[in-house]
Amino acid sequence: MKVLVTGGAGYIGSHTVLTLLAENHSVVVFDNLCNSSIEAIKRVERLSGKSVTFIQGDVCDKAQLNELFIGHDIDAVIHFAALKAVGQSTQMPLEYYQNNVYGSLCLLEVMQLHQVNNFVFSSSATVYGEEAQPPYLETIKLGTTASPYGATKVMVERIIEDFVKANNAFRAVSLRYFNPIGAHESGEIGEDPLGIPNNLLPYIAQVAVGKRDKLSIFGNDYDTEDGTCKRDYLHVMDLAQGHVAALDWLENNPNFNGAEVFNLGTGNAVSVLEIVAAFEQAYGKTLAYEFAPRRSGDLPAFWADASKANSQLNWQAKRSLLQMMTDTWRWQSNNPNGY
Ligand code: NAD
Ligand code: WQD
């Protein structure tokens, strides 16, 4: 297939592009580079020995998207392009709704114009909201999300549902990711956040490489075994494979039209202290940390019921926690300042 990957220079996008190339798909990346570097694409080309068509542009620019679809015979779109910082979204809600919701509307409109009917959307476990009880199953009614970021994911899922009802030819898969971590095993591509990392693993990796003094663990008085929050962390290369599985599923189900959702997680919950211990094993030293107050909006524990992806997409997260840590550390130690 010829696959358009919006946001393909980003963390999950770059790993997915590499996986798509390995599966002999051809790839056009469309990214405005607002949170990424072209170097990621260069490294993907080097690692794969294949070339990627890169177009710098914004998904909110319908004219540019139109040009892209005129110039390339696209079979399917994987839509990663979005702003993703939960805390920032509470400070800049309009930018988040504009970028994530309006950007998706523009993309869908131009896809419709060009009759490109296969769509994979990056959704998130955050759509289950604050009331849902883990493990999260796709059939749970979507809840109240704690942030504008989360709300944009719920809204786009809803837009997709309505769109497929009105457009019989359109086929969509929303993938609800849990907590992607790790890096490609080469150590050449990985997560490269701007500024102070918000997420746990990039922060830990920066402490290990000496860029930050110590990790603050947000809360040790939760109702969990060791008092710290538990999440379903999955390796980004397993997640990348999940996108290929979603495309294969669309291709193998030509009569499907509609919108399907799948959780992509391991099905296991791991605490922050367990993450620290696993990272120390890969790192070979102890990691400096302190306990700090709870971070507002954090839920004590959630993890996926990933059986639907397992049975229907034939997908399973295979890489171990230790591999996630080893690959994170290889990427960070080889690239202390990112790209
Ligand atoms: P990322 O920031 O590394 O990648 C997003 C990419 O999209 C970046 O390269 C950025 O430059 C690009 N982009 C943003 N707005 C754009 C626009 N208007 N036009 C064109 N390009 C634009 O983030 P990521 O972690 O790779 O996340 C990818 C997707 O997965 C996002 O939709 C995110 O919400 C979703 N997601 C991420 C996580 C996670 O923990 N990383 C979890 C669940 C869902
Ligand atoms: C994990 C755990 C923190 C940093 C977020 C989004 C979610 C999804 C994935 C996009 C929590 C603790 C963290 C630190 C810490 N993204 N922590 N010290 O919050 O589960 O999910 O990213 O869709 O929508 O909300 O991930 O990595 O920020 O936190 O103790 O410096 O690590 O409290 O328990 P989170 P995270």
Image (cartoon, rainbow, N blue to C red):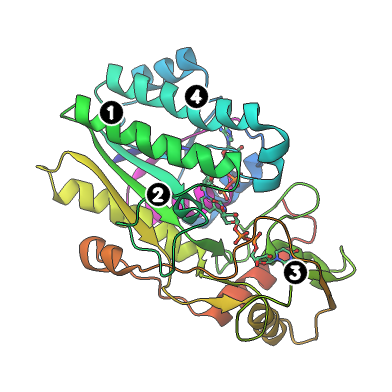
Q: In percent of the image, x 21 and y 62: which residue is there?
A: 312
Quick check: 253 above or below 157? below
Q: Is mark 2 within 8 Å of ligand 2?
A: no
Residue 163 image label: 1
Between discs 4 and 2, the one toward the N terminus: 4
Q: Amino acid at mark 4?
A: Tyr
- SS state under label 4: helix
Between discs 2 and 1, the one toward the N terminus: 2
Quick check: 252 above or below 107? below
x then y, percent, for residue 181:
58, 64
- Single out the residue that lies furthest toward the front: 131
**Alpha-carbon distance for marks 3 and 4?**
34 Å
Q: In percent of the image, x 64 and y 28: which residue is there?
A: 95
Q: Amino acid at mark 1?
A: Phe
x then y, percent, for residue 310:
28, 68
Other-residue count near label 4 (Cα within 10 Å), few / some / many at <14 / 14–19 / ≥20: some
Query: Magenta segment range?
Result: 10-32
Q: In percent of the image, x 22 and y 53: which residue is there?
A: 249
Q: To which residue does mark 2 refer?
A: 142
- SS state under label 1: helix
Taking the image as shown, residue 307 lies to the left or right of residue 60, namely left
* Foreground residue among 40 and 45: 40
**Alpha-carbon distance for marks 1 and 3?**
41 Å
x then y, percent, for residue 165:
20, 30
**Alpha-carbon distance for marks 3 and 2?**
31 Å
* Image quadrant occupied by the N terminus: top left
Indicate which label's residue lies in the foreground, 3 or 4. 4
